[in-house]
Amino acid sequence: MSHYDVAVIGGSYAGLAASLQLARARRKVLIIDAGLRRNRFAATSHGFLGQDGRSPGEIVEQARAQVLAYPTVTIHHGRAESARGEKNDFSIWLDDGTAVQARRLVLATGVSDILPEIPGLAERWGRHVFHCPYCHGYELNGGRIAVIAVGEVSMHHALMLPDWGDTTLFTNGRFTPDRQQTEALAARGTHVESTSISALEGEAEIVLADGRRLAFAGVFTAPTTVPSSPLAEQLGCAFKDGPLGRYVDVSPMMESSVNGVFACGDLARMAGSVSIAVGDGAMAGVSTHRSLMFE
């Protein structure tokens, strides 16, 4: 069985950022990556300083090559199926049937998005349907924007997005704004449409139950998120409940409730972005190294 100082589970932005810090500390690191980035559906990434407008895949490929140039880092292209153990003695079983041991774990497995079940929506996810205004709002060039409600949490989108374009909130039977909410929406210039949505067609055309077709520059909605891997739960990490889903509860130094297990990226945040994931990953890497130094 191979032994490592740290196993980093998840090789996207947060996991690679953590691995880079550990590699530069000359620690023996194994990155385990299934290759399913959360933003793999998007053609471009925005809001990440120095990389604005680049393909998310290109950013990750370049970052991975830089990290793997360090001689103490190796990568397993596949899944970590299960993990157990304690500080200094964690075991991870891989999808090829082998197992590895590590003194520390960094969980950067990310989350999966559960989208509203509206015909045509999933096919447009990341291209014409989005969740982050800071990542995709500017490119809509001030055009008309739709917000598809999933519940009261969608008020956040409905009140934010007028800064990027003329906004319509489709309540779609998921919630009805009360008087105070209606006044807040009116103050921001957000229109409210209560007719149910039948489908999305074209690029960003919403088809309503009454037959109307409304074209938009882009559509926003708030998916429910679930951890992409069961490892954090298997290891006994504590979770918090956010408005969109559960996430691992971590300290400011990105350590979970389980001694020796760190978590970063979307797995350990209520909401995030590429730049935030990179920052959290760097902190997790440094904190993991400190844990190894000062036992």
Image (tube, rainbow, N blue to C red):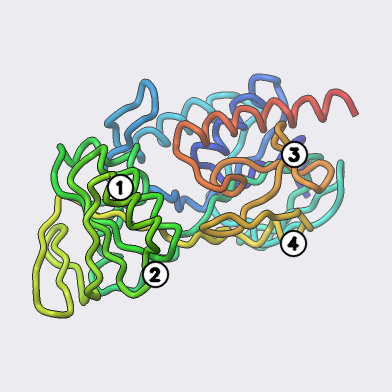
Assess whether mark 4 and mark 1 are in contact (beta carbons under 8 angstroms). Answer: no
Decide: is 242 above or below 164.
below
| Rendering coords of residue 13 (x, y %) | 49, 37
* Relative image position of residue 133 (x, y in whole percent): 33, 42
Residue type at mark 3: give it: Glu
Which SS class for mark 2? loop
Q: Is residue 285 left or right of residue 181?
A: right
User: From the viewer's perspective, is 65 left or right of 47?
Assistant: right
Q: Of residues 207 and 268, which is closer to you in this image?
A: 207
Q: Earlier in the sequence, mark 2 or mark 4?
A: 2
- Crowding around mark 2 (Cα neighbors within 10 Å: few <14, some 14 to 19, many 20+) is some
Residue at 82% of width from left, 29% of height from top?
292
Please name the amino acid that badge 1 sits on. Answer: Ala
Using the image, determine if residue 10 lies above or below residue 274: below
Q: Amino acid at mark 4?
A: Gln
Check residue 42 in the rendering and tell me which mark sits there, or answer none.
1
> Sequence order check: which comes first, mark 1 or mark 2?
1
Give left or right: position of 201 versus 32.
left
Q: Position of residue 185 (x, y in %)?
A: 31, 51
Per the model, the C-alpha gap separating discs 3 and 2 is: 37 Å
- Between residues 264 and 34, which one lies in front from this camera angle? 264
- Kindly report which numbered mark, 1 or 2, lies closer to the viewer in this rendering: 2
Q: Are marks 2 and 4 in contact (CB under 8 Å)?
A: no
Q: Which residue is mark 3?
A: 255
> Looking at the image, which residue sits at the far bottom?
210
Which numbered tag is attached to residue 175?
A: 2
What separation in Å lies between label 1 and label 3 (alpha carbons)? 30 Å
